[in-house]
Amino acid sequence: MIPFSPPYIDEENIKAVSDVLRSGWLTTGPVTKQFEEKIKEYCKCNEALCLNSATAGLELALSWFGVKKGDEVILPAYTYAATANVIVHCGATPVFVDINKDDFNISIASIESAISARTKVIIPVDIAGNPCDYDEILALAIKHQRVFKASTDIQRKLGRLLILSDSAHSFGARYKNKVSGSLADISIFSFHVVKNLSTGEGGAINLNLPDNFDNLKVKNELKIKANHGQSNNAFDKENKHTWRYDIIEAGYKFNMSDITAALGLVEIKRYNNLILARRKKIFAQYDAKLKDYDWAVTPISKTEIKTSSFHLYLLRIKGINELQRDEIIDEITRNEVAVNVHFIPLPMMTFYKNMGYSIDEYPSAYENYSQEISLPVFIDLTDKMIDTIINTLVQATEKVLDTKQLP
């Protein structure tokens, strides 16, 4: 069986974790701080704070910005549940909009039509690692400043919609010569086991707020929120030789441990030369092998202004429907190749359907979903495996397409 996305673990990872275990300090401490500095250096952002997941980062940012019941947050219908669930947790209303058919990213025109006096945040999602159109999204936020109704001091200080990037897929991607993590007011990374840069579980919040904000001060506020609202974390108390602390607010338990951060330090060190380089090569091999099939719509991974992180290879099969796509996947799976679908649009999920959302309102999202198959991309994927994947895909697709053509 060719797997879909197994983790890449070698002796360097194992040694890094072993060193932390032997150090006697396992929770948030010096290694996590080092990882934050490396993220900040790599992304060229103002500040970075490591957390236990990207979901934690999204919710933390919404909470800090004061998003609450009665507010609206705009996001694409085509994303994973975490992007919308955190909005519901805050008591606010998710406002789904449609996507671009070519690159799966949020539609600028759809964002503009959805902005209202209740809108507080726009969450663009870098699907598959392909950056959204951030300059255009920021221009929309500035254009609609008069519509924006601030209800907290932080919102008044920003004076416009917050651009909160769900960058879960896009570590290492580039947009107009800037690195993902520095493209929005706040950007959120995921370091989940299937992501390009993996710590098993984990995430980070990158701050690039305007100059009238003190980004380090904001980081420290978020750090307190991420640790139960406690004024001193365990590492700080140890260094200051004091047991005393205060609870400033009802915070969360969102911190990253030094064990997971140790994995991150190894991965970020070799990210460009090993991880990105190998994934880019796999994408190129898939592109080359699929170019002669008129039914294959290969993903956009590079334009004049964007370069993907090569996270997911979102292949579309031209002209098929959802049932036929499922038949192709079943046939591929029977031949022991693991593929996936990214993603089922959220208006198709029971929870969101019960809230009144309908996929009929998002035709591009549904069409892309119904024709999409994600092919395996991982470091240990060999050329022989790639040949097997393509051969299996071609046979399965042409079998279903031939059946489709029968009277």
Image: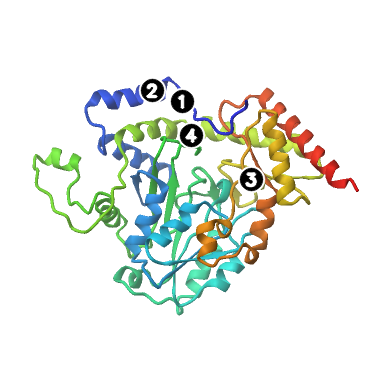
Which residue was labeled with disc 2? 14
Q: Position of residue 27 (x, y in %)?
A: 26, 36
Nearer to us of marks 4 and 2 is 2
Q: Residues within 10 Å of mark 2 (few under 14, many from 20)?
A: few
- Is residue 224 left or right of 349 when viewed as pictured? left
Q: Position of residue 184 (x, y in %)?
A: 46, 57
- Is residue 147 left or right of 31 when viewed as pictured? right
Nearer to us of marks 1 and 4 is 1
Residue at x-position 42% and y-position 35%: 200
Labels 1 and 4 touching (C-beta < 8 A):
no
Considering depth in this image, is 269 or 64 the residue closer to the camera? 64
User: Element type at marker 2?
Assistant: helix
- Is residue 353 left or right of 322 when viewed as pictured? left
User: Element type at marker 4?
Assistant: helix
Q: Which mark is residue 9?
A: 1
Dot 2 or dot 1, earlier in sequence: 1
Real-space Cα separation, disc 3 to disc 4, in angstroms: 18 Å
Labels 3 and 2 touching (C-beta < 8 A):
no
Labels 2 and 1 touching (C-beta < 8 A):
yes
Q: Quadrant of residue 364?
A: bottom right
Considering depth in this image, is 181 or 391 the residue closer to the camera? 391
Q: Which mark is residue 185?
A: none
Nearer to us of marks 1 and 3 is 1
Labels 3 and 4 touching (C-beta < 8 A):
no
Nearer to us of marks 3 and 2 is 2
